[in-house]
Image (spheres, rainbow, N blue to C red):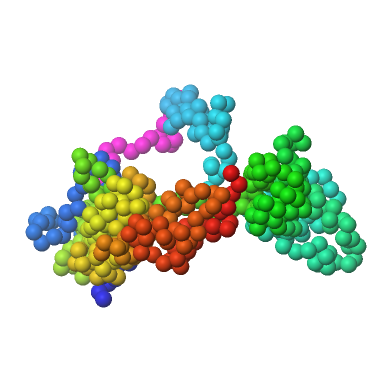
């Protein structure tokens, strides 16, 4: 492959954010490239094209410096009185103090800003360990207890549970410190009072009990919830409600309220502290409906417009073989290739996106249940390209639609035959399964076999195993775990 083709393929498979970084690096390394500023008439005419008349220019080494009619006054050529007169009492400034103050304080909450959240104004989240260490440093304790606390916090996983037993933690300390097991357990109890509630638990039962103990004493069904977690958590996990009602001597409605209180707790308290940075998605294509027609257009704001710098390109002399001229000529050629590769990328992206919208009008109108089967070969055949090219175009490229932002690969799915001889996409089947589960009787949830039967009644022939696979991909639990008390 030629270097131009390699560059075009590489740009084609970059996401929008990666492409922006690639363009910025090209602008910094190649003086022949420049950004088209907003409001300027875009002119990407190549100054060295054969059909454009070139005006004679001076050689690079002969560029004259701008001349000044009058030199600036200096201290040496001014009298003392004249020098003092030229100094104003108040020197001009670019901005006022109020502007600086408002700019620096713009991210702080105002007095009437009730929804201000510090975590939303920071680029990176806080780790669970740092959050717990911050609370530990605020707690008054001895140096030995603080050492134990730091060790315990290091043993807490991202879900908020203590990974090691207290005996194993005790063995990790130096025997000369003379630390006893009771001291470690006492420090653990202090850490278990930190936020988020339930942190530092050794099992699920202890985690839920820690959260229940922090609720007000007047909370309804609090005592029954503690008893349920302490004595009958296995029956609760098995959803054996008849046994629970018999052993706890509760009626069905009473047990339901107790379970609702337990379900309001967080079995993974550590997950409340988000340590990963937010990921942003910039759509490459925008789809909108105008007068019953679906319009497809590139997101012009996502990628800056580039052009060849006409002034620098005009310095290149055709017959000059000097080192400077050869360098500038190579830079000009690379700038041409880069701009042409960007244009090729945009054209290919538009062709593919247009064909996807043409195939998936039903999805845009009615949602997932109207998604049609679509494979890479269908789009490749329609636009006259290879399937590998379509795969590159649809990876990490996003489409903004009235229904949300989707990766282009989302619109591709396999098919299942229907009883009428047609085809139904796997995406549509997942949407139907999700709809059936949402409308099921929670006392008697639908089994995979029952769901397969309901799909067959709609003309969609799907095996029970396939239903189970689709259900798991949707994050829907089996019927035995979806059973609820009404």
243 vs 416, left or right, is right
Q: Image quadrant for the N terminus?
A: bottom left
Check residue 92 for magenta coloring.
Answer: no
111 vs 214, left or right, is left
> Is residue 204 in view from this perspective?
no
Above or below, comparing residue 258 to residue 10 in the picture: above
145 vs 111, left or right, is right
Q: Image quadrant for the C terminus?
A: top right
Of 271 and 461, the residue lying toward us: 461
Name the residue at 75% across, 64% down.
164
Name the residue at 55% across, 26% down.
112
Report which quarter residue 53 is drawn in.
bottom left
Report which quarter residue 250 is drawn in.
top right
Name the residue at 36% across, 57% down.
457
* Dominant secondary-structure state across the stretch colored magenta: loop
Of 3 and 221, the residue lying toward us: 221
The magenta span reads 62-81
Residue 133's x, y, as percent?
A: 72, 51
> Is residue 221 in view from this perspective?
yes
Residue 240's x, y, as percent?
A: 66, 55
Residue 241's x, y, as percent?
A: 66, 51
Residue 455's x, y, as percent?
A: 38, 58
Of 51 and 163, the residue lying toward us: 163
Of 295 and 96, the residue lying toward us: 295
Check residue 65 for magenta coloring.
Answer: yes
């Amino acid at each position: 492959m030629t270097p131009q083709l390699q560059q075009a393929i590489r740009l084609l498979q970059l996401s929008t954010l990666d492409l922006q970084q690639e363009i910025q690096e090209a602008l910094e390394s190649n003086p022949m490239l420049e950004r088209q500023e907003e409001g300027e008439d875009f002119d990407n005419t190549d100054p060295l094209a054969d059909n454009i008349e070139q005006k004679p220019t001076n050689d690079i080494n002969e560029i004259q410096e701008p001349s000044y009619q009058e030199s600036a006054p200096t201290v040496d050529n001014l009298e003392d009185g004249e020098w003092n007169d030229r100094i104003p009492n108040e020197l001009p400034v670019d901005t006022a103090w109020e502007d600086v103050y408002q700019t620096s304080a713009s991210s702080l909450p105002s007095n009437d800003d009730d929804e201000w959240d510090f975590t939303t104004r920071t680029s990176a989240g806080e780790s669970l360990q740092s959050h717990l260490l911050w609370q530990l440093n605020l707690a008054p304790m001895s140096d030995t207890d603080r050492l134990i606390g730091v060790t315990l916090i290091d043993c807490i996983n991202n879900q908020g549970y203590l990974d090691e037993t207290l005996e194993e933690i005790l063995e990790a300390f130096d025997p000369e410190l003379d630390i006893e097991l009771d001291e470690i357990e006492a420090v653990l109890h202090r850490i278990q009072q930190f936020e988020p509630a339930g942190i530092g638990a050794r099992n699920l039962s202890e985690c839920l009990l820690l959260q229940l103990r922090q609720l007000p004493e007047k909370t309804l069904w609090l005592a029954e919830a503690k008893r349920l977690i302490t004595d009958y958590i296995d029956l609760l996990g098995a959803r054996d409600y008849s046994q629970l009602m018999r052993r706890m001597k509760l009626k069905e409605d009473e047990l339901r309220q107790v379970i609702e209180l337990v379900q309001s707790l967080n079995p993974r308290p550590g997950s409340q502290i988000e340590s990963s940075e937010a990921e942003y998605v910039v759509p490459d294509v925008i789809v909108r409906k105008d007068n019953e027609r679906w319009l497809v257009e590139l997101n012009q704001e996502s990628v800056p417009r580039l052009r060849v710098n006409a002034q620098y390109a005009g310095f290149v002399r055709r017959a000059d073989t000097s080192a400077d001229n050869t360098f500038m000529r190579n830079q000009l050629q690379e700038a041409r290739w880069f701009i042409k590769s960007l244009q090729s990328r945009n054209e290919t992206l538009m062709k593919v996106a247009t064909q996807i919208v043409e195939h998936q009008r039903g999805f845009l109108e009615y949602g997932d249940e109207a998604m049609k089967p679509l494979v890479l070969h269908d789009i490749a055949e329609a636009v006259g390209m290879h399937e590998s090219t379509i795969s590159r175009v649809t990876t990490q490229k996003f489409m903004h639609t009235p229904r949300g932002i989707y990766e282009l690969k989302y619109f591709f799915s396999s098919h299942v035959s229907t009883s009428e001889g047609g085809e139904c996409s796997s995406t549509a089947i997942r949407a139907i399964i999700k709809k059936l589960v949402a409308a099921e009787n929670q006392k008697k949830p639908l089994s995979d076999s029952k769901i397969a039967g309901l799909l067959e009644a709609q003309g969609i022939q799907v095996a029970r195993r396939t239903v189970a696979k689709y259900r798991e991909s949707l994050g829907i639990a089996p019927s035995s775990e979806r059973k609820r008390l009404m």
